[in-house]
Image (cartoon, rainbow, N blue to C red):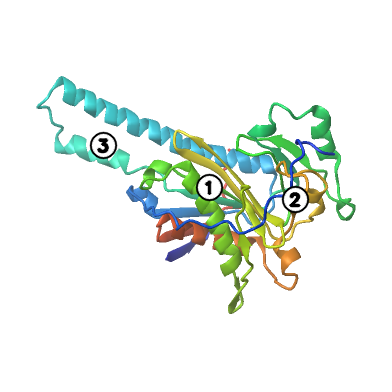
Amino acid sequence: MLVSRITARSSSLIKTSTLPSLSYIPIPKAYSTYPIDESAKTIRHLQFKNRIPFEKGLRIQEKLARVQLDMKDIHSKIQKKLTDLQKEHVNATINENEKKIIDNILAMKPNPIVLTFEFEPTYTGGKRVKKVITKEQMAAFEEFVPLEQKKNPKPKFVQVERGGQITFHGPGQMVAYIIMDLKSFHDYPAKCLVSDIEQATINTLENIPIGEEKLHLKTMRTENTGVWTKTGGKIASLGIHVRRSITTHGVAINVNPDLSYLNSFEMCGLSNAKATSIKDQVPDANITVEDVAITFVKELAKLLGVKRVERMQADDINLDQ
């Protein structure tokens, strides 16, 4: 895989459920897909190293998703116009200049983008809690500060449009948002992207480098969405949102967060499940959020059949205007 670097400047909430079964679930053969649009042959990794507010990350994601959606509208209008022209005038053709203009417009389709962040403390509610969570419950999240975090800001509660229930985002956690057109890949429905995000996370925790060695942290899937350790801890949460085949949101991988944020409330509707992290599982491993971000994007690209990743440090680029 070619990787080029471009320098630039979650009190009980959900109905009680049981601990997920942690026996290994057979992982199906990696879903075979590949880019069918030229634009999808390169993934752009926009990496934010500095910790930022969660709402800012959401705004950046929405603006980039809007670009994808707007371009999809343009493509659709062009194709409809050409189809209508052919129906009205069976023998009609477009001249070379018109064809060149249309080809140039179609070639402007954005690449798939992966945004990676480390956020300030934030609890987020997915679609499954949107209509049932109360103001009192939201306030409980926003008033909670672990003992070792008393000097830090209180967390916020933000409702988002992804699937799932309550999750936490904050320091020591790598969050990746995946903005891509599913129709740019061969036979690739949303459920396959979810599967590939899980597998990319599993592969990341196995293959992330530690000097000349690899982490080799063994993780697995269960009947519950996410990635789990063999001892039953949840190490990654995920949820995506799809609009007209354009995806947003993605995955949060626990690197070295204060686990009190995640284990003092019921996360993901699983009352007995506890969160864990890379630091919790392998205390001597000096793994950073940045390390996890870089490896995750590479592993996801492999599963998508994409051979080129372009990484840009995006902290100094004003994408929030």
- In the picture of the structure, the residue carrying the numbered disc 2 is 273
Name the spot of residue 291 as percent of width and height, x first: 61, 64
Left or right: 197 as drawn, with respect to 154? left
Mark 1 Cα within 10 Å, few/some/many (few <14, many 20+)?
some
Nearest the viewer among 297 and 106 is: 297
Q: Earlier in the sequence, mark 3 or mark 1?
A: 3
Which mark is in front, 1 or 2? Answer: 2
Three-letter amino acid code at disc 3? Ile
Q: Are marks 3 and 1 in contact (CB under 8 Å)?
A: no
Left or right: 190 as drawn, with respect to 216? left
C-alpha separation, residue under disc 3 versus residue under disc 2: 53 Å
Residue at point 72% right, 62% down?
Answer: 231
Three-letter amino acid code at disc 1? Val
- In the picture of the structure, the residue carrying the numbered disc 3 is 102
- In the picture of the structure, the residue carrying the numbered disc 1 is 194
Name the spot of residue 129 as percent of width and height, x first: 70, 32
Q: Secondary structure at mark 1?
A: helix
